[in-house]
Image (cartoon, rainbow, N blue to C red):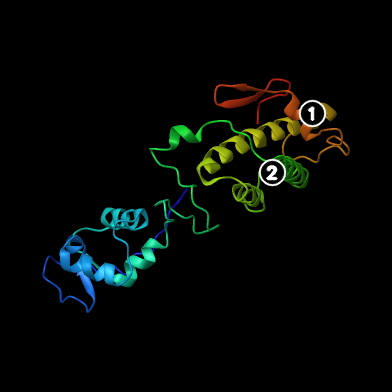
Amino acid sequence: MSKITDYRYLFQQMFGNARTNLTGSFQLSQLNSKSVQAQLRAAGIDTNSKQYKAALKEMMRNGNGAMYANIQGIKNSMKCYDKDGDYINPTNGLAGLLVTEENESQRKRIISIPESSKDEMFEQTKKEFLRENGALNGDTTRRLDVYTNMYRKMQKNDRLAAGYTMQQYERAYRQALLAAARKADPGWSIGKPIKPGALDNITREDIESNLRKSGSTLIQASFDESI
């Protein structure tokens, strides 16, 4: 997941020479000084908050002590994080979707997700499968909308695992559709027209009834797994 943060409020020294400090600005290396901390608190910034600390960490990682910041710039950066210091996805406004080294292991787990979300994914997968004759088209797919709708229904700390779980279901749905298309027409291959009615009897419930959990994945042993 790409992460884009606006750092226009940072002003870098050039060629190692001292640069005139802009009014209201200060070097990042001065952020912990008493005078700057007093300015931040006077501006309503809680320097003990997780939101501030997350913004500061990102600023320091992308800049260096010689760069400049100002109060409004810090406030803008803090808007990228929630009260827990979690990054807010700029596309959908949701936190809890940034994969890090710390949460990677917790992401790869199967959890309970809304039936309505699974139903939406099945219908969208089937619709696109028929429209594209089994091909995957990144330009026209609306699968991201399905994931976003599901994330809004989940608790923040479960969103990454929910996304991982949905990927498992999505894969199983596609495998079942591929198997059905090939069964109806043994000579069919991805990209060729699908035989009319080939997918009529495929239901989400039937697919999921044959799924079994194997470690951190869901396996559909009844269908051809080749994609």
Q: Amino acid at mark 1?
A: Asp
Q: Which residue is mark 2?
A: 117
Residue 119 locus on image (x, y percent):
74, 41
Q: Is residue 202 above or below residue 155?
A: above
Question: How much space separates mark 1 and mark 2, taking CA atoms?
Answer: 16 Å
Q: Is residue 25 above or below residue 186?
A: below
**Quadrant location of the C terminus in the rendered image:** top right
> SS at mark 2?
helix
Q: Which residue appears at 54% of the width and 43% of the height?
A: 159
Task: Say few, some or many: other residues with alpha carbon within 10 Å of mark 2 (under 14 / 14 to 19 / 20 or more).
Answer: some
Q: Quadrant of residue 69?
A: bottom left
Labels 1, 2: front one:
2
Tag 1 residue: 206
Q: Residues within 10 Å of mark 1 (few under 14, many from 20)?
A: few
Q: Residue furthest right?
A: 197
Does 155 sit left or right of 23 as displayed? right
Residue at horizontal 67%, vertical 53%?
140
The quadrant where residue 223 appears: top right
Residue type at mark 2 is: Ser
